[in-house]
Amino acid sequence: MPDSLTLLFDADDTLWDNNIHFERAIEAWLGVVVNGAWTPEAARAELDRIEEASFTTGGVGTTPFGVHLRLAAEAIVPPGDLAIALPRIEAIVGAMPRGAVTLLPGVAETLDALGRRHTLGLVTRGDPAEQWAKIDASGLRHRFAHVAVVEHKVPETYRGLAERWGLDPAATVMIGNSPRSDIVPARAAGFRAVLVSHATTWRLELAEVDPDDPGVSQADRFEDLLGMF
């Protein structure tokens, strides 16, 4: 591996907590929509089905999430009860935090140390206004030479960033908690990758990673990156 690298970082659930807010909203939503005909597991499966259908064609973030909750509720809640359920769901989404972030342990210090040795970049997916608000609130913006808020994370995304930023894929590493968005497509684009463990990674972001792929490493903690790079 070259001595000088470009390290690209995912943001949500890699640098700061994010999915936990969506999981809490889903728990509240289940309390609204579950009825005698639907178990919590079946209701969550219906929500997963709707979110999966828009994973690669629709956006992610609080606003699309609210749409998905509404669509799932319309399939679950008896029509006569929707007039009560839908405002409650809107209130759940409206109470979700937007823009405020809490950095995960060791993130700032680790980025500072890595930035003295390598070029750092940030690649995050989501609603641009929402993601930029979180980037600004994090206080991390000045640590990155490159920042991109992208609609999707697919191999073409990473190839396009390499071309735009003049990156050598062999000397570029994508670091994140999501196998489906951070690891698999980055590898397909020729980058190396590091999967950083996170306790509440979104279930739709889980994917099989080849355990024998020498281009993929794993880190249990963000600080472990210091010993890797």
Image (tube, rainbow, N blue to C red):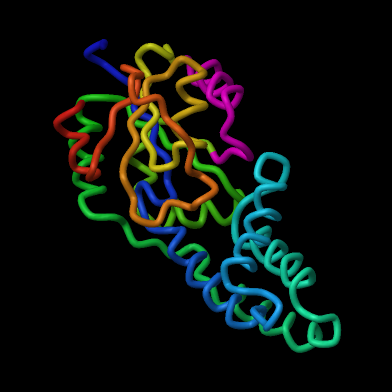
Q: Residue at x 34, y 62 (%)?
A: 102
- Residue at the spot x=58%, y=72% of the render? 40
Query: Foreground: 219 or 60?
Result: 219
| Residue at the left extreme, as displayed | 227
Q: Position of residue 73 (x, y in %)?
A: 73, 72
* The magenta stretch spans residue 92: no
Please say if 26 is above or below 166: below
Farthest right residue in view: 80
**Quadrant of residue 45 in the image?**
bottom right
In which quadrant of the rendered view does residue 122 lie?
top left
The residue at the point 22 percent across, 13 percent down is 3
Q: Position of residue 186 (x, y in %)?
A: 47, 25
* Quarter of the figure with the N terminus: top left
Residue 10, above or below 138: above
* Number of marks in the rendered image: 0
Residue at point 34%, 36% (across, down): 195
- Where residue 209 appears, as percent x and y from the top left, is 42, 30
- In the foreground, 72 or 36: 36
Q: Which residues are magenta?
A: 149-166
The secondary structure that dominates the magenta segment is: helix
Q: Describe residue 106's horizontal placement relative to residue 139 as left or right.
A: left
Q: Is 126 placed left or right of 86 in the picture?
A: left
Q: Position of residue 26 (x, y in %)?
A: 55, 70
Left or right: 167 as drawn, with respect to 214: right
- Direction front: furthest residue: 37
